[in-house]
Image: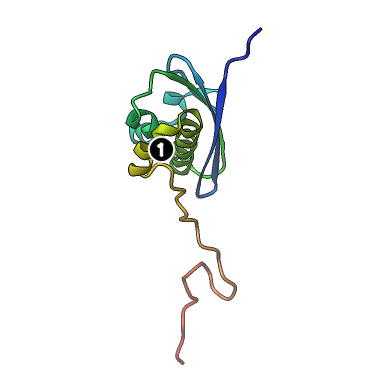
Amino acid sequence: MAQKQEYLGTGRRKTAVARVRLASGTGKITINGRKLENYFMTESQRIHALQPLTVTESVSKYNVRVNVNGGGPNGQAGAVRHGIARALLQLDATLRPTLKTNGLLTRDPRMKERKKYGQPGARKRFQFSKR
């Protein structure tokens, strides 16, 4: 039995991590065992997650399986986007200029700032009393 070729890509955004497997197929997309429409409820999240495939015009060429955990829905959509872009790069290196000009290969470094001691949040201070 011949095993079909799968291309892997890991995407990260905030605290979300997505492990993407890309294989040639009909355009079936599953995220954590669920269909894309059932996992990402808003249309903007779906568009954001599938941006690398739409930019490279390969939505119906590949089947995508994703395992994603951590973070919220928007962070997970960003992680899936990053992972798909990296998997496409493994599949075909000639797509690099297209993905790069659209900013799909750049890892978004913005994270939640840590809470500091002696104050209630990252930047917020306790109320100051002069007298």
Image spot of residue 69 (x, y percent): 57, 38
- Residue type (three-letter) at the residue carrying disc 1: Arg
Image spot of residue 88 (x, y percent): 46, 31
Q: Which residue is at 33% across, 32% downward?
A: 55
Image spot of residue 93 (x, y percent): 45, 33
Q: Which residue ends up furthest to the front in the rendered image? A: 94
Q: Is residue 32 visible?
A: no
Q: Which residue is at 50% across, 67% downward?
A: 122
**Does dot 1 land on a helix, a strand or a loop?**
helix
Q: Which residue ends up furthest to the bottom in the rendered image? A: 131
Q: Is residue 85 visible?
A: yes
Mark 1 lies on residue: 96
Image spot of residue 118 (x, y percent): 58, 76
What colouring does the structure picture have?
rainbow
Name the one closer to the observer, 73 or 81. 81
Q: Which residue ends up furthest to the right in the rendered image? A: 1
Depicted 13 relative to depicted 128: above or below: above
Name the one closer to the observer, 82 or 130. 82
For the N terminus, the quadrant is top right
